[in-house]
Amino acid sequence: MAPPVQPKSFVARHVSAIPRSGIREFFDVVQNQSDVISLGVGEPDFVTPWHIREAAIYALERGKTSYTSNLGLLKLREAISHHLEKNFGTAYDAKNQILITVGVSEALDLALRAVINSGDEILYHEPCYVSYSPSITMTHGVAVPVSCKAENGFAVTGDAIERVITPRSKVLILNFPTNPTGGTMIRTELHKIAEVVLRHNLLVITDEIYSELTFEGDHVSIASLPGMKERTIFLHGFSKAYAMTGFRIGYACGPSELIEAMMKIHQYSMLCASIISQEAALEAILHGEVDTSEMREQYRARRNYIVNSLNAIGLTCNLPRGSFYAFPSITSSGLSSKEFAVRLLQQEKVACVPGSAFGPSG
Ligand SMILES: Cc1ncc(COP(=O)(O)O)c(C=O)c1O
């Protein structure tokens, strides 16, 4: 007789070892409760601007229901190329240096899978987006966080990065403005990081998903600094700047050899991003600038309100210089971040994400 089935025993060890996202775990509870104010999931509460939705509808009306090239529609890649040259000071060839993906999520996964050999160390600043550490683990890399502090506006320094570098260090992930702290980087410090990257021959993966939502100063991408474009994979998408999370559309840019490697994985796993979403993204990048700046001003007003209010009730909160997050310190409550979040939910019906979900530094 066959032994009793234990489905769990079929799950790969490295996948078993990954915890579920601290955000999702918490929000599964919230889903079943009405009258809760949810401040947790990193998603604009704006609906995608109408002209962008209309572009998607029009694409369907014209029967745009096929696969596209694995790299994505050429006209979208060309528009992205112009957009990045104009706004980020980095020029990428639409023919072989840009890959359209299913959100920055897929782009990040492809970038990691394309470059990591088992045991390579991947550095990133923390608190950070919940996906970085598990995505590294799933590609058999070793996650190496660099802790950032509220006193420094949650920016990371070249010195802090250099301190954790070993001969196995291969990639540095940057995300400014940062999820969940709203930290940004000034150009001079970014130059110091670039020097460290060059000195130790690292590859950079820069997640620029919040760059349009920068409130103070100009956003600078490390890809635009001298000598960096050749060793940087630039990730960006439409989810946040144009409130298009449900379209699942993003892109990766970089040296053609790296984009080719990523494209091979994309080709066999995803094939291409949805053509409807690509058509909508084209409309967004060509005509969505005004919508982005209107939403940014709304986020700025909300940021000012919430940060002032948090500080007024004794929850010290650093002023986020970008993104749509606030990351207050709950130390004065004497509770752990999970206890705090649970009590806030139970007593005040407000859902937020415990800091610990963003890594030990959170
Ligand atoms: C820093 C960061 N990168 C990537 C993503 C995923 O973005 P996308 O919707 O493009 O997959 C998010 C979503 O919250 C994020 O905060």
Image: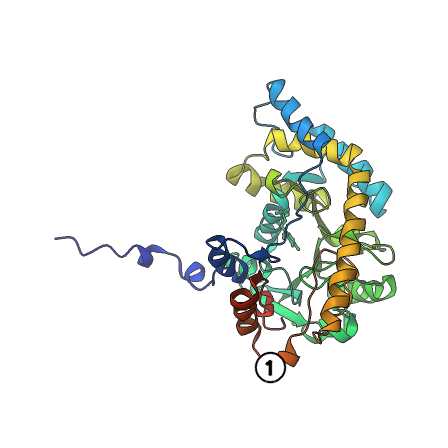
Instruction: Please state which of residues 179 and 251 is positioned toward the viewer in this rendering.
Output: 179
Residue 212, percent across and down?
Answer: 78, 49
The number of discs equals 1
**Secondary structure of the residue carrying numbered label 1:** loop
Name the image quarter holding residue 317.
bottom right
Q: Is residue 331 at all visible to an observer of this figure? A: yes
Ligand 1 within 8 A of label 1's CB?
A: no
Judging by the rendered image, the residue that carries numbered circle 1 is 334
Instruction: Please state which of residues 195 and 280 is positioned toward the viewer in this rendering.
Output: 280
Residue 26, percent across and down?
Answer: 51, 61
The quadrant of the rendering that contains the C terminus is: bottom right
Instruction: Please state which of residues 285 and 346 is positioned toward the viewer in this rendering.
Output: 346
Residue 95, percent across and down?
Answer: 73, 33
Amino acid type of disc 1? Gly
Q: Is residue 78 left or right of residue 112?
A: right
Residue 297, percent across and down?
Answer: 81, 50
Residue appearing at x 77%, y 50% in the figure:
298
Instruction: Please state which of residues 178 and 351 is positioned toward the viewer in this rendering.
Output: 351
166, above or below 43, in the image: below
